[in-house]
Image (spheres, rainbow, N blue to C red):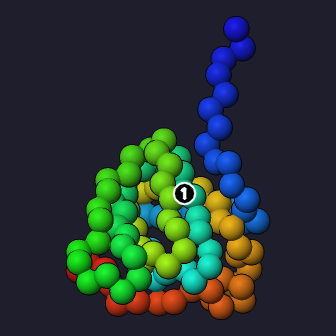
Amino acid sequence: ARGKIHNLIDAPFTSAAVIHSVKGAIRGNHYHQTDYHYCWLQRGRMIYYHRPVGDRRPPTRWVIKAGQLFYTPPRYEHMMRFTEDSVLFVFAKNNRTMAHYEADTVRIPPLIS
């Protein structure tokens, strides 16, 4: 009678962030050594790419629309290309203060051009 509850994430995390991206923005081109994150696109649209570290095959590609949730495991190279102005919620396992984030993040060449 009151509606429904849909549990989105059942995993430990210590960071929750909201990222605003403009159409055409690219984020990522890195991987995390130990961190993982769940991302939920609240508004907008994006293309998400990822592949295991060291894999030379083209990355897997998904079109993510508002309301969709996706997961990036540790040691997965990933990149996001925003095709609309977007708002993305990111729930990460590790502390995301700049020092912690940079210590766990490995930058890579662009996954796609």
Q: Nearer the viewer, residue 93 or 41?
A: 93
Q: How many residues crowd around disc 1 within 10 Å: few (fewer than 14), some, or many (20 or more)?
A: many
Residue drawn at x 39%, y 46% is 65
Q: Quadrant of residue 52?
A: bottom left
Of the residues shown, which amino acid type is indicated by label 1?
Answer: Cys
Assign the C terminus to one quadrant of the image. Answer: bottom left
Q: Nearer the viewer, residue 62 or 20?
A: 62
Residue 19 position, x and y percent, is: 57, 63
Give the secondary structure at mark 1: strand
Find disc 1 in the rendering and name its residue. Answer: 39
Residue 112 position, x and y percent, is: 26, 78
Decide: is 28 above or below 69: below
Q: Quadrant of residue 101?
A: bottom right
Residue drawn at x 62%, y 74% is 35
Decide: is 43 above or below 106: above
Residue 76 position, x and y percent, is: 45, 75
Task: State whether residue 81 appears in this view.
Answer: no
Residue 51 position, x and y percent, is: 36, 73
Seen in the image, is 78 located left or right of residue 18? left
Residue drawn at x 70%, y 8% is 1
Residue drawn at x 34%, y 67% is 49
Task: State whether residue 92 appears in this view.
Answer: yes
Decide: is 99 above or below 112: below
